[in-house]
Image: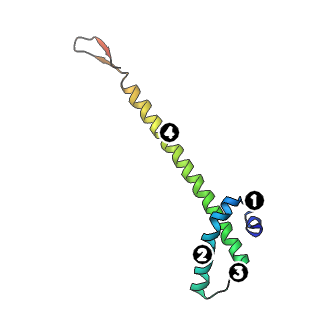
């Protein structure tokens, strides 16, 4: 964990570490198997760092998307509400306000 934190340059929570570890281990096994290499602990630390970084960025993007969707919904509701408060003129020139 400490080596991954040194690559990242900041602490990694235990939850982030436990989430990233099995994914990084699987990736390490696939790389070693595919290329016939024997990367070890140092490379695993780098893969953990990459996974934590990816997860943090993914979480940021998802949160940003949810905010944008909420803003779109709010704007659509405001447009819909203002559309119902428009003045309409009857053929005789009488102003009717829809509510």
Q: How many marks?
A: 4
Q: Which residue shows up at 68% across the image and 67% down it?
A: 49
* Numbered badge on residue 71: 4
Q: For residue 5, which quarter of the picture?
A: bottom right
Which residue, given by chain and number where applicable, does mark 3 sit on?
A: 40
Task: State the image coordinates of residue 57 (x, y, percent, origin top left).
Answer: 61, 57
Separation of disc 1 and disc 4 at Cα? 33 Å
Task: State the image coordinates of residue 65 (x, y, percent, origin top left).
Answer: 52, 49
Using the image, determine if residue 72 lies above or below residue 93.
Answer: below
Task: State the image coordinates of residue 90 (x, y, percent, origin top left).
Answer: 25, 15
Of 75 and 30, the residue lying toward us: 30
Task: State the image coordinates of residue 55 (x, y, percent, origin top left).
Answer: 61, 60
* Sequence order check, earlier mark of 1 and 2: 1
Which residue, given by chain and number where applicable, does mark 1 sit on?
A: 11
Of 29 and 47, the residue lying toward us: 29
Separation of disc 3 and disc 1 at Cα? 22 Å
How crowded pointer 3 is (Cα within 10 Å; few <14, some 14-19, many 20+) is rated as: few
* Numbered badge on residue 27: 2
């Amino acid at each position: 964990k400490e080596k991954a934190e040194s690559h990242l340059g900041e602490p990694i929570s235990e939850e982030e570490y436990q989430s990233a570890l099995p994914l990084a281990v699987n990736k390490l096994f696939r790389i070693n198997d595919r290329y016939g290499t024997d990367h070890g602990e140092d490379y695993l630390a780098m893969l953990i760092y990459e996974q934590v970084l990816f997860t943090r960025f993914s979480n940021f993007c998802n949160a940003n998307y949810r905010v944008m969707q909420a803003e779109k919904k709010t704007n659509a509701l405001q447009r819909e509400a203002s559309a119902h408060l428009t003045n309409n003129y009857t053929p005789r020139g009488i102003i009717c306000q829809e509510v």
